[in-house]
Image (cartoon, helix red, strand yellow):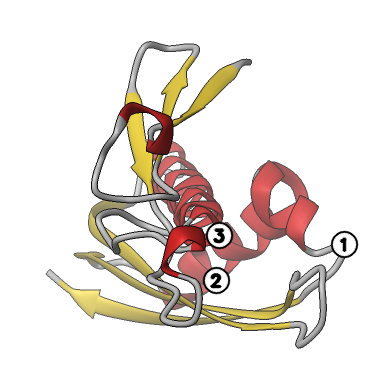
Amino acid sequence: MECTVTWTGATGTRSNMGFVAETGSGHVLTMDGAPDEAKPENGGANMAARPMETVLAGTGGCTAYDVVLILKRGRHNVTGCSVKLTTERAETEPKVFTKIHMHFVVSGTNLPQAAVERAVAMSHEKYCSASIMLAKTADITTSVEVVAA
């Protein structure tokens, strides 16, 4: 797996801290920093997600992918899955995530709560590389809500 991240501030864009990531699979992701009132030259223009937000989004995508796949392989009729991630970060550098809570809302027909909880647990214990990696610095908790479709 590879990715090339290029600073766009050098090309004269409105943001001093914009970046474009091109993934090995050929997709593009933009990132930007927050505006810095004290030192505008060091800030972004709020034109894209922050880099740490993309880490969080990637983690959510990784675990949601696992949950849907595990449920489908178990022949469950899953019709929807979302996960809301909330975090706390360290107050000093490096400002790593120290707490992450993931709230899953999974919908389907006759979808057993126990099956969804098992899929979430399997993702976090075995399959989701991103959440397992982040668990090295953050306490990760989960909650599950099953909605009949």
The reply, left or right, for residue 134 in relation to residue 23 is right
Q: Is residue 92 above or below residue 109?
A: below
Real-space CA distance between mark 3 and mark 1, rounded to the nearest whole angstrom:
16 Å
Residue for badge 3 = 52
Nearer the observer, disc 3 or disc 1? Answer: 3
Task: Tell me the quadrant of the picture where the C terminus can be found.
Answer: bottom left
Real-space CA distance between mark 2 and mark 1, rounded to the nearest whole angstrom:
22 Å
Residue for badge 1 = 136
Name the amino acid, label 2.
Answer: Glu
Q: Secondary structure at mark 2?
A: helix
Nearer the observer, disc 2 or disc 3? Answer: 3
Q: Is residue 82 visible?
A: yes
Task: Tell me the quadrant of the picture where the N terminus can be found.
Answer: top right
Counting residues from the N terminus, which is met first, the one under dot 2 or under dot 3? 3
Real-space CA distance between mark 2 and mark 3, rounded to the nearest whole angstrom:
27 Å
- As drawn, which residue projects farthest toward the left? 149
Q: Position of residue 74 (x, y in %)?
A: 46, 44
Q: Residues within 10 Å of mark 3 (few under 14, many from 20)?
A: some
CB atoms of marks 2 and 3 within 8 Å? no
